[in-house]
Image (cartoon, grey):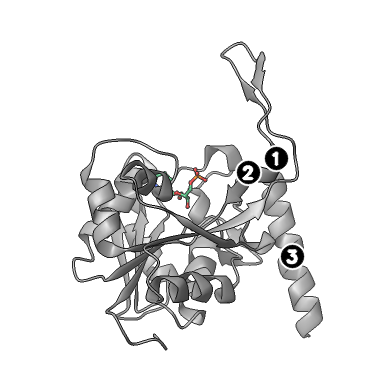
Amino acid sequence: MNDLHNGGPVVALVPAAGRGVRLGESMPKAFVAVGGISMVRLAVDGLIASRAVDRVVVMVPAEFVESAVALLPPSDSVRVVIGGAERTDSVRAGIDAAPDASYFLVHDAARALTPPELIARVAAELRAGHRAVVPALPVTDTIKSVDAHGGVTGTPDRAGLRAIQTPQGFAADLLRAAYATDVHATDDAGLVELLGTQVRTIPGDPLAFKITTPLDLLLAHAVLEGMDARTS
Ligand code: C5P
Protein backbone atom coordinates (compact mmCIF):
# COMPACT_ATOMS: atom_id res chain seq x y z
CA MET A 1 0.00 0.00 0.00
CA ASN A 2 2.74 2.39 0.98
CA ASP A 3 4.82 4.23 -1.62
CA LEU A 4 7.27 5.64 0.93
CA HIS A 5 9.26 2.84 2.45
CA ASN A 6 11.78 4.54 4.72
CA GLY A 7 11.12 4.70 8.43
CA GLY A 8 8.66 1.92 9.29
CA PRO A 9 4.93 1.42 9.08
CA VAL A 10 2.34 4.17 8.94
CA VAL A 11 -0.79 3.02 10.78
CA ALA A 12 -4.04 4.95 10.41
CA LEU A 13 -6.33 4.94 13.45
CA VAL A 14 -9.96 5.64 12.60
CA PRO A 15 -12.14 6.52 15.60
CA ALA A 16 -15.65 5.43 14.58
CA ALA A 17 -17.13 4.59 17.98
CA GLY A 18 -19.08 7.82 18.56
CA ARG A 19 -22.85 7.76 18.95
CA GLY A 20 -23.25 10.84 16.75
CA VAL A 21 -26.25 12.20 18.62
CA ARG A 22 -26.00 15.61 16.87
CA LEU A 23 -26.59 13.98 13.49
CA GLY A 24 -30.04 12.81 14.60
CA GLU A 25 -29.78 9.36 12.94
CA SER A 26 -30.73 6.08 14.62
CA MET A 27 -27.32 4.44 14.18
CA PRO A 28 -23.79 5.52 15.15
CA LYS A 29 -22.63 8.30 12.87
CA ALA A 30 -19.80 6.37 11.20
CA PHE A 31 -22.33 3.82 9.92
CA VAL A 32 -24.60 6.40 8.30
CA ALA A 33 -24.36 6.25 4.50
CA VAL A 34 -23.37 9.12 2.24
CA GLY A 35 -24.20 8.43 -1.40
CA GLY A 36 -24.98 4.80 -0.48
CA ILE A 37 -21.65 4.11 1.27
CA SER A 38 -21.06 4.29 5.04
CA MET A 39 -18.87 7.12 6.29
CA VAL A 40 -16.43 4.67 7.86
CA ARG A 41 -15.98 2.85 4.54
CA LEU A 42 -15.49 6.13 2.69
CA ALA A 43 -12.88 7.22 5.24
CA VAL A 44 -10.99 3.91 5.03
CA ASP A 45 -11.14 3.94 1.21
CA GLY A 46 -9.63 7.44 1.25
CA LEU A 47 -6.78 6.29 3.51
CA ILE A 48 -6.03 3.32 1.24
CA ALA A 49 -6.26 5.47 -1.90
CA SER A 50 -3.63 7.84 -0.45
CA ARG A 51 -1.03 5.04 -0.88
CA ALA A 52 0.68 6.49 2.20
CA VAL A 53 -0.78 4.12 4.80
CA ASP A 54 0.40 0.57 5.55
CA ARG A 55 -2.40 -0.50 7.88
CA VAL A 56 -5.73 0.78 9.14
CA VAL A 57 -7.25 0.15 12.58
CA VAL A 58 -10.91 1.12 12.94
CA MET A 59 -12.43 1.56 16.42
CA VAL A 60 -16.19 0.93 16.64
CA PRO A 61 -18.82 0.33 19.36
CA ALA A 62 -18.64 -3.28 20.68
CA GLU A 63 -21.96 -4.28 19.15
CA PHE A 64 -20.93 -2.97 15.70
CA VAL A 65 -17.72 -4.95 15.24
CA GLU A 66 -19.36 -7.56 13.00
CA SER A 67 -21.15 -5.04 10.82
CA ALA A 68 -17.96 -2.99 10.50
CA VAL A 69 -16.00 -6.04 9.34
CA ALA A 70 -18.73 -6.70 6.76
CA LEU A 71 -18.71 -3.07 5.56
CA LEU A 72 -14.96 -2.64 5.24
CA PRO A 73 -12.70 -3.90 2.45
CA PRO A 74 -11.64 -7.52 3.14
CA SER A 75 -7.91 -6.95 3.61
CA ASP A 76 -5.20 -8.09 6.04
CA SER A 77 -4.31 -4.41 6.28
CA VAL A 78 -7.65 -3.36 7.79
CA ARG A 79 -8.51 -4.34 11.35
CA VAL A 80 -11.54 -3.56 13.53
CA VAL A 81 -11.26 -3.17 17.33
CA ILE A 82 -13.67 -2.09 20.06
CA GLY A 83 -13.60 1.65 20.85
CA GLY A 84 -14.34 3.34 24.17
CA ALA A 85 -16.73 5.71 25.92
CA GLU A 86 -14.77 8.86 24.94
CA ARG A 87 -12.93 9.55 21.71
CA THR A 88 -9.62 9.42 23.61
CA ASP A 89 -10.52 5.91 24.86
CA SER A 90 -11.15 4.85 21.27
CA VAL A 91 -7.83 6.26 20.05
CA ARG A 92 -6.03 4.58 22.96
CA ALA A 93 -7.56 1.23 21.93
CA GLY A 94 -6.23 1.79 18.40
CA ILE A 95 -2.73 2.67 19.64
CA ASP A 96 -2.68 -0.53 21.72
CA ALA A 97 -3.65 -2.55 18.63
CA ALA A 98 -0.60 -1.32 16.64
CA PRO A 99 2.52 -1.78 18.80
CA ASP A 100 4.83 -1.88 15.75
CA ALA A 101 3.70 1.45 14.21
CA SER A 102 6.39 4.03 13.47
CA TYR A 103 3.85 6.72 12.58
CA PHE A 104 0.18 7.20 13.37
CA LEU A 105 -2.40 9.06 11.34
CA VAL A 106 -5.50 9.63 13.48
CA HIS A 107 -8.41 10.23 11.15
CA ASP A 108 -12.07 10.70 12.11
CA ALA A 109 -14.53 8.48 10.23
CA ALA A 110 -16.76 11.55 10.23
CA ARG A 111 -14.35 13.32 7.81
CA ALA A 112 -15.47 10.84 5.19
CA LEU A 113 -14.74 12.97 2.10
CA THR A 114 -11.14 13.86 2.97
CA PRO A 115 -9.09 13.86 -0.27
CA PRO A 116 -6.42 11.10 -0.38
CA GLU A 117 -3.96 13.78 -1.47
CA LEU A 118 -4.31 15.55 1.92
CA ILE A 119 -3.68 12.24 3.73
CA ALA A 120 -0.55 11.68 1.64
CA ARG A 121 0.71 15.20 2.43
CA VAL A 122 0.40 14.64 6.20
CA ALA A 123 2.27 11.31 5.91
CA ALA A 124 4.99 12.92 3.77
CA GLU A 125 5.57 15.60 6.44
CA LEU A 126 6.03 12.85 9.04
CA ARG A 127 8.47 10.98 6.82
CA ALA A 128 10.34 14.27 6.36
CA GLY A 129 10.96 14.36 10.13
CA HIS A 130 8.14 16.48 11.57
CA ARG A 131 6.81 14.72 14.66
CA ALA A 132 3.32 16.21 14.83
CA VAL A 133 1.45 17.46 11.76
CA VAL A 134 -2.14 18.69 11.45
CA PRO A 135 -4.16 20.10 8.52
CA ALA A 136 -5.46 23.60 9.24
CA LEU A 137 -7.81 26.08 7.57
CA PRO A 138 -8.19 29.82 8.30
CA VAL A 139 -11.43 30.54 10.18
CA THR A 140 -14.03 32.58 8.33
CA ASP A 141 -16.25 33.45 11.31
CA THR A 142 -15.18 35.80 14.07
CA ILE A 143 -14.59 33.65 17.18
CA LYS A 144 -15.44 34.92 20.68
CA SER A 145 -14.82 33.42 24.09
CA VAL A 146 -17.81 33.48 26.44
CA ASP A 147 -18.48 32.82 30.13
CA ALA A 148 -20.94 30.27 31.54
CA HIS A 149 -23.82 32.75 31.03
CA GLY A 150 -23.00 33.50 27.39
CA GLY A 151 -21.40 36.88 28.16
CA VAL A 152 -18.53 37.68 25.80
CA THR A 153 -15.13 37.64 27.51
CA GLY A 154 -12.88 38.21 24.51
CA THR A 155 -12.37 38.35 20.75
CA PRO A 156 -9.11 36.71 19.67
CA ASP A 157 -7.56 38.04 16.46
CA ARG A 158 -9.01 35.85 13.69
CA ALA A 159 -5.82 36.07 11.64
CA GLY A 160 -4.03 33.95 14.23
CA LEU A 161 -6.71 31.25 14.46
CA ARG A 162 -7.07 28.01 12.48
CA ALA A 163 -9.72 25.29 12.30
CA ILE A 164 -7.98 21.93 12.65
CA GLN A 165 -8.90 18.84 10.64
CA THR A 166 -7.77 15.23 10.42
CA PRO A 167 -5.76 13.18 9.62
CA GLN A 168 -3.49 14.32 12.43
CA GLY A 169 -0.06 12.71 12.03
CA PHE A 170 2.39 11.80 14.79
CA ALA A 171 5.64 9.95 15.32
CA ALA A 172 4.33 6.84 17.08
CA ASP A 173 6.46 7.23 20.21
CA LEU A 174 5.15 10.78 20.65
CA LEU A 175 1.47 9.80 20.42
CA ARG A 176 2.07 6.86 22.79
CA ALA A 177 3.69 9.24 25.28
CA ALA A 178 0.78 11.70 24.96
CA TYR A 179 -1.74 8.95 25.65
CA ALA A 180 0.28 7.63 28.60
CA THR A 181 -0.66 10.85 30.44
CA ASP A 182 -4.09 11.16 32.01
CA VAL A 183 -4.92 14.64 30.74
CA HIS A 184 -7.77 15.51 28.42
CA ALA A 185 -7.87 17.53 25.20
CA THR A 186 -10.40 17.85 22.38
CA ASP A 187 -7.95 16.54 19.80
CA ASP A 188 -4.85 14.40 19.68
CA ALA A 189 -2.56 17.31 18.83
CA GLY A 190 -3.82 19.02 22.00
CA LEU A 191 -2.41 16.16 24.07
CA VAL A 192 0.92 16.38 22.23
CA GLU A 193 1.06 20.17 22.79
CA LEU A 194 0.73 19.54 26.53
CA LEU A 195 3.98 17.54 26.33
CA GLY A 196 5.67 20.69 25.01
CA THR A 197 6.09 19.40 21.44
CA GLN A 198 5.72 21.85 18.55
CA VAL A 199 2.83 20.86 16.28
CA ARG A 200 3.21 21.80 12.60
CA THR A 201 0.23 22.91 10.53
CA ILE A 202 -0.11 22.30 6.81
CA PRO A 203 -2.89 23.69 4.58
CA GLY A 204 -6.09 21.68 5.10
CA ASP A 205 -8.85 21.04 2.57
CA PRO A 206 -12.50 22.16 2.78
CA LEU A 207 -13.53 18.63 1.70
CA ALA A 208 -12.09 17.27 4.95
CA PHE A 209 -15.00 18.85 6.86
CA LYS A 210 -16.47 16.86 9.74
CA ILE A 211 -19.99 15.53 9.17
CA THR A 212 -21.62 16.42 12.48
CA THR A 213 -25.09 17.88 11.86
CA PRO A 214 -27.94 17.05 9.42
CA LEU A 215 -26.82 20.08 7.37
CA ASP A 216 -23.31 18.60 7.06
CA LEU A 217 -24.87 15.36 5.85
CA LEU A 218 -26.83 17.23 3.17
CA LEU A 219 -23.63 18.98 2.11
CA ALA A 220 -21.76 15.64 1.92
CA HIS A 221 -24.51 14.16 -0.28
CA ALA A 222 -24.40 17.21 -2.55
CA VAL A 223 -20.59 17.06 -2.82
CA LEU A 224 -20.66 13.37 -3.80
CA GLU A 225 -23.43 13.98 -6.34
CA GLY A 226 -21.41 16.83 -7.82
CA MET A 227 -18.34 14.57 -8.07
CA ASP A 228 -20.37 11.78 -9.73
CA ALA A 229 -21.84 14.25 -12.23
CA ARG A 230 -18.33 15.40 -13.18
CA THR A 231 -16.98 11.86 -13.67
CA SER A 232 -19.98 10.41 -15.58
O1 C5P B 1 -18.36 13.39 18.09
P1 C5P B 1 -17.29 13.81 17.14
O2 C5P B 1 -17.82 14.17 15.79
O3 C5P B 1 -16.35 14.83 17.68
O4 C5P B 1 -16.42 12.50 16.92
C1 C5P B 1 -15.26 12.53 16.12
C2 C5P B 1 -14.89 11.10 15.74
O5 C5P B 1 -14.55 10.36 16.92
C3 C5P B 1 -16.04 10.34 15.06
O6 C5P B 1 -15.55 9.64 13.91
C4 C5P B 1 -16.54 9.42 16.15
O7 C5P B 1 -17.09 8.19 15.66
C5 C5P B 1 -15.27 9.15 16.96
N1 C5P B 1 -15.54 8.76 18.38
C6 C5P B 1 -15.06 7.53 18.84
N2 C5P B 1 -15.33 7.13 20.14
C7 C5P B 1 -16.07 7.91 20.95
C8 C5P B 1 -16.55 9.18 20.50
C9 C5P B 1 -16.25 9.59 19.19
O8 C5P B 1 -14.41 6.80 18.11
N3 C5P B 1 -16.36 7.46 22.18
Image position of 23 (left or right of 63): right
Query: What label does residue 158 carry, if any?
Result: 1
Q: Secondary structure at mark 1?
A: helix
Image quadrant occupied by the C terminus: bottom right
**Real-space Cα separation, disc 2 to disc 3, in angstroms:** 26 Å
Q: Is residue 127 above or below residue 177?
A: below
Query: What label does residue 79 carry, if any?
Result: none
Q: For mark 2, what is the residue?
A: 161
Q: Position of residue 157 (x, y in %)?
A: 69, 36
Q: Quadrant of residue 73?
A: bottom left
Q: Residue at x 64, y 44 (%)?
A: 160
Q: Amino acid at mark 1?
A: Arg
Q: Residue at x 76, y 84 (%)?
A: 231
Q: Amino acid at mark 2?
A: Leu
The residue nearer to you, when weighing 157 against 169, is 157
Callouts 1 and 2 close, C-beta under 8 Å = yes
Q: For mark 3, what is the residue?
A: 223
